[in-house]
Amino acid sequence: MFRVLAALLILFALPASARAPKLTLFISVDALGSDLLLRNRPRLTGGLGQLLNTGAYYPYARYAYAEARTAPGHATLATGANPWRHGIVDNDIHDRASGQSVQVYMDPEHPVLDGVTVPNSDTSPANLMAETLADRLRVSTQGRGKVVALSMKARAAIPLAGRQGQAWWFDEATGNMVTSTWYAKEVPAWMQTFNARKLADAGFGKAWELLRPRAEYVGEDDRAAEPPDPYGMGRTFPHALSGGLEKPGPASYRVFAVSPLSHDLLVQAAKAALEGEGLGRDDVPDILAVSFSGTDAVFHAFGPYSWEMQDSLLRLDQALGELITAAERAAGGRANLVIMLSADHGGAEIPEAWAQAGVPATRIHPVEAAKELANELRAQFSVDVTVKLLELDVYLGGKALESGQVDGAAVRRAAAAWLSKQPFAVMAVAKDDLDAAPDIEGLVAPLRRGYYPVRSGDVLFVSKPFHVVSDYPRGTNHGTPYSYDVQVPVVFAGRGVKPGLYHQEIDPVDVAPTLSALLEVGMPASAEGKPRAEALTGR
């Protein structure tokens, strides 16, 4: 009897088994930088605001690589790795064989299922070189755990689904949610039913109105630095959502994807997935990943300080309330649910607006810079060298380089030397020197973490702060190692999470390992991060 009692005492002294949550809700908000969220937090009273108040909130997570973009950001959140491991260096890369820019998840062997595939567009995870959290869950549960990822963008849904989940994204040609032949052989019944609702058509002819009285919005609706007619929806509220058409079509679907109606569509798609796939119904853990993309489209056109961005966040706050409620219901209560919210990147203000405020900001036109660099290389080497500038990557080509007529390393170093002297650049480095280059202002290390051979440029450079690289004469962009681009929030909530405000700076590579710990599975194979133990209860 004594031995039995002693054994029971030892058993009860051990930590309780951390039973995995039935459902993990993985939320990404495209372009939700730390500063953007902090500025708007006092007005958020819905799902987003409640998540910040009741979860483990890290306001200052910082990506450790240089090019803060949608595709690499989502890949890092999904894998716990930086681009030097997962291989997704940017949204677009330069295909040296064809001489064209292609989307990084392009895969001609896996076209869009039951739809039209835009040439060179994202369709599969074939180019993702690291295991994802979704893949790890599928392997650990021997295929019993389900993963569904939804977004308005393929480059967000694909990494969140990994190789073994389901990825669905919005098709601006048809207004439907689509996938590729990588993920399915036929569209499941629940998605057919959802698409038949034609939610994007239901938004046709409506106007995007302000959610709250005009006096509650900060700044001006009509800012001089904004484009004259972004997406054909007008520059001020209310915004027309017809796209200039008489009936729904690609132009109206594009406008729909920008508007907060896109938030609502994704929530409805998520509810359809919860029901159709039976997510959260048994003790085998499932993942539902939702990436809200409308905020990024608003950011690029109107900027992070605009009324449009403020209103989009207010409406997202409402939409997240509905999404979280649906997830809780599917899992049988918050005790069976884990929630994570973060972002793929932040973003710069419209540079002309910064300049009007006295900030030393300007717009860098990549086509013009590429022409000037090509002329410089022609003058130095007496051959024609093609130059393509994509964000911080500079791709060099041409017959003289490819045939060995000139020394490739010498050309690359000459290009880096010229870029380093330009008024918009802090530094530049040829790929030949990336490993040994002195870490000028701590900027070479982020370039290294973002470099992947073959896909990255021949020369990498870093622009000065507040200098925005953009192909367009208006609007704004992101993609630098500065805080406004790389600093994002991370929030964990639900089962096994210790609520609180955590001011220490973390790296988004910690997201997948932390969720792995909560899910009671191993970390993704190439993960560089670690679980945030301070935010976990251990139960």
Image: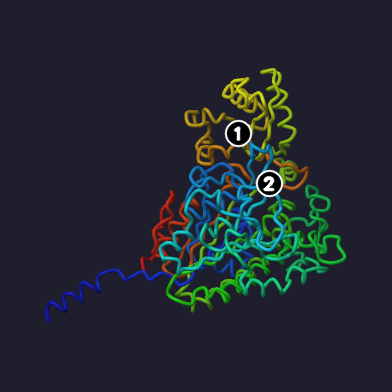
Query: Residue 149 appears at what percent x and percent y?
Result: 57, 63
Q: State the residue position of label 2.
A: 477
Which label was assigned to residue 231? none
Q: Residue at x 60, y 56 (%)?
A: 156
Q: Residues within 10 Å of mark 2 (few under 14, many from 20)?
A: many
Residue 387 is at least partly visible in this image: yes
Q: Residue at x 78, y 57 (%)?
A: 221
Query: Residue 443 appears at what percent x and percent y?
Result: 54, 36
Residue 238 is at least partly visible in this image: no
In the image: residue 121, left or right of residue 509: right
Vertical arrangement, residue 29 with respect to residue 360, above or below: below
Which label was assigned to residue 461? 1
Q: Quadrant of the N terminus?
A: bottom left
Quarter-of-image position of residue 141: bottom left
In the image: residue 12, left or right of residue 265: left
- The span from disc 1 to disc 2 (Cα, nearest Å) is 16 Å
Q: Quadrant of the C terminus?
A: bottom left
Tell which circle, 1 or 2, labels the residue nearer the N-terminal end: 1
Q: Secondary structure at mark 1?
A: strand
Quarter-of-image position of residue 44: bottom right
Q: Residues within 10 Å of mark 1 (few under 14, many from 20)?
A: many
Query: Residue 434 appears at what percent x and percent y?
Result: 51, 31
Q: Residue at x 61, y 32 (%)?
A: 426
Vertical arrangement, residue 528 with respect to residue 330, above or below: above
Q: Nearer the viewer, residue 523 or 518?
A: 523
- Mark 2 residue type: Asn
Q: Secondary structure at mark 2?
A: loop
**Pointer 1 and pointer 2: residues touching (CB < 8 Å)?**
no
Most distant residue in the bottom direction: 1
Quarter-of-image position of residue 458: top right
